[in-house]
Amino acid sequence: MKADSYIIAHMKVEALSPKPATSQSSSWTFFSNHAHVLLSLYRNPDSTLRDVANQVGITERAVQKIVAELEAANVLSKTKVGRCNRYSINKKKRLRHAIESHRNVGDLLRFIETD
């Protein structure tokens, strides 16, 4: 019985131990989730937020928050079409950070979409 307890306790400690980062487990990307959501809606303006969440790899609630922030910043607007939403992007809106404020949302989307 003692051996079983030791194995279970060891398994719990091992499960809680941090794993070393590898190139495949690294989670950072060059673009924020805001950019990912925006790009997803640019590619498919009739997407559901659930579909966007699955594509971006975040929760639907996180997508809702991002969409609300993009709407508040006048980057994104939505129009009700029946029971669905259709999203429009204000491509002329300047990017917010001082480093890229000389560019607009349309520039960003064209940059990402260009081969």
Image (cartoon, rainbow, N blue to C red):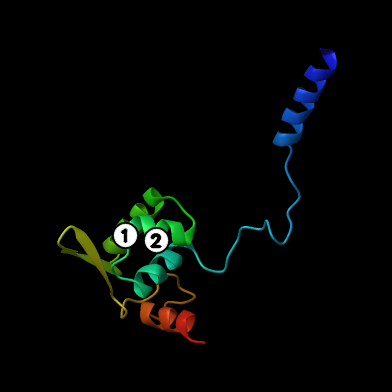
Q: Residue 88, how many percent across, how many down?
A: 26, 72
| Farthest-out residue, bottom | 115
Going by the numbered disc 2, the residue's amino acid type is Val
Q: Quadrant of residue 45?
A: bottom left
Instruction: Judge whether 87 appears above or below 22 on screen.
Output: below
Q: Are marks 2 and 1 in contact (CB under 8 Å)?
A: yes
Helix, strand, or loop for circle 2?
helix
Q: Quadrant of residue 54?
A: bottom left
The residue indicated by pointer 1 is: 48
Q: In which quarter of the image is residue 43?
A: bottom left
The span from disc 2 to disc 1 (Cα, nearest Å) is: 6 Å
Going by the numbered disc 1, the residue's amino acid type is Thr
Pick the residue in front: 92 or 11.
11
Residue located at (72% from left, 42% from top): 18
The residue indicated by pointer 2 is: 52
Q: Quadrant of the N terminus?
A: top right
Q: Residue 19, how many percent across, how many down?
A: 74, 46
Is 20 on the left or on the right of 78, as rendered? right
